[in-house]
Image (cartoon, rainbow, N blue to C red):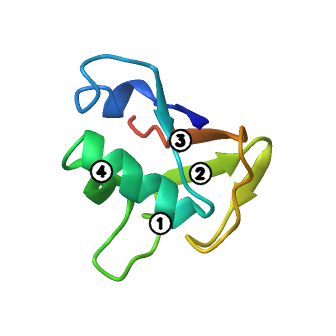
Amino acid sequence: MNTVRVPSPLRDYTGGVARIGASGSTVAEILGHIEQQHRGMRFRMIDEQDRIRPHIRIFVNQREVRSLDEAVAPRDEIHLVCALSGG
């Protein structure tokens, strides 16, 4: 089971929880598992063409991933990061 750190803008989907568990061997599988538990959350991060949205960053441990096909090892920590904007 992997630990996924959820940023505050996405915590409405997790009932306010900052860390959730998810399983999978790729980023896509992890996000699929998250979607099963927290409906609607994946769409906030991934667009209709299965690409990571521009305002979202996904890290496996300290490495930023660019593709949903990137591998995830057991017990890796996934960090979901939302860009901030404003003025």
Separation (CA) of disc 3 from disc 4: 14 Å
At horizontal 39% and vertical 24% (from top left) the residue drawn is: 8
Give 24 or 79, whichever is nearer the viewer.
24
Q: Is residue 52 left or right of 63 when viewed as pictured? A: left
Going from N to C along the chain, the mark reached first, 4 or 1, is 4
Residue wearing tag 3:
80
Q: Is residue 71 left or right of residue 84?
A: right
Residue at (61%, 74%) from the top-left corner?
Answer: 69
Query: Tag 1, which secondary structure?
Result: loop
Q: Secondary structure at mark 3?
A: strand
Residue 58 badge: 2
Q: Amino acid at mark 3?
A: Leu
Q: Residues within 10 Å of mark 4 (few under 14, many from 20)?
A: some
Q: Which residue is mark 1?
A: 52
What amino acid is found at the position of numbered circle 2 in the picture?
A: Ile
Instruction: Say which label, 4 or 2, has the lower sequence index.
Output: 4
Instruction: Decide which of 74, 12 is in the foreground and name it.
Output: 74
Q: Pointers 1 and 2 in contact (CB under 8 A)?
A: yes
Pinpoint residue 42: horizontal percent, then vertical percent: 32, 55
Residue 15's place in the image compared with 22, above or below, is above
